[in-house]
Amino acid sequence: MMQNGRSAPSRRSTSRWTGPVRAGDGTPSAPQYSICELVEWKRTQTCVPTPHQVHAPIALLGKYAILSHRWDRNQELSFADINNLSDPVVQAKKGFKKLSGFSKVVESLYGCRYVWMDSACIDEADRNESIPHMFGWYRHAYACVIYLSTSAIVSKDPWSTIGWTLQEFLAASRIKCFTVLQTLNQICESRSPGLENVHAGTRDR
């Protein structure tokens, strides 16, 4: 038998694994190999991963993506809503569509295990205490995803006129924009037109 250009291990008489047996006569239905032979054979059939292939998944472990968006009055998901995402009332909110689109973008582009959305992740009772930490949360996020509510051109969307989003934009190290009207493929292929002019040209990213 040949696999990946290498032959199967030869049979020997020491400590053998016989594999499954046929019903009735008990005759082994698989070649008899020693455990050591099987381990060594398996090892030689597996390509050794490159350092990048090992480091990339480890780097993502525990990483989170963060959402930058302009709030819609009475339409955002709240801290309490997160425990009731199956509720039709919660799903009817614009914030639910934001979270859904945000999650799909993150999963497809970055593979982060966690997402962070300020309206849903900060309890109003802790709001004042949380504000000083906002810059750090955006700074340490693996990626920042910007939600554009009215235009796919960043500088023409109300997002670019809000003071809070300027801080988020400056803090983020990796940025992607999306609108709910775009397909996932369009989002992945987009280059965020107008981003170079956002916030009066403060930053070109």
Image: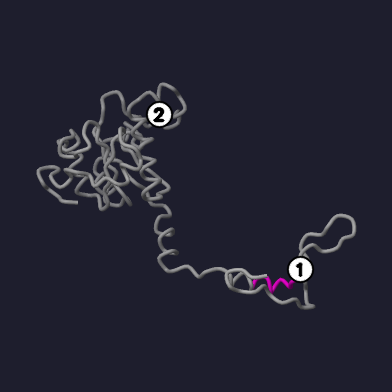
Task: Please tell me whether mark 2 or mark 1 is closer to you in this view.
Answer: 1
In front of the other: 123 or 64: 64
Q: Is residue 38 magenta?
A: yes
Q: Tag 1 or tag 2, which sits nearer the N-term? A: 1
Q: Is residue 4 above or below residue 179?
A: below
Residue type indicated by callout 2:
Asp
The residue that appears at 32% across and 46% down in the rendered structure is: 188
The image position of residue 93, as x and y in percent, is 35, 25
Residue receiving disc 2? 81
- Left or right for 150, reference 106: left
The image position of residue 187, as x and y in percent, is 31, 42
Using the numbered discs, state the Cα–Cα distance from disc 2 to disc 1 in whole angstroms. Answer: 58 Å
Residue type indicated by callout 1:
Pro
Q: Secondary structure at mark 1?
A: loop
In front of the other: 94 or 170: 94
Residue receiving disc 1? 31
Name the image quarter holding the N terminus: bottom right
- Please provide the residue range marked out in magenta: 33-40
Specify the principal SS of the magenta part: helix
User: Where residue 43 is drawn, which disc sits there?
Assistant: none
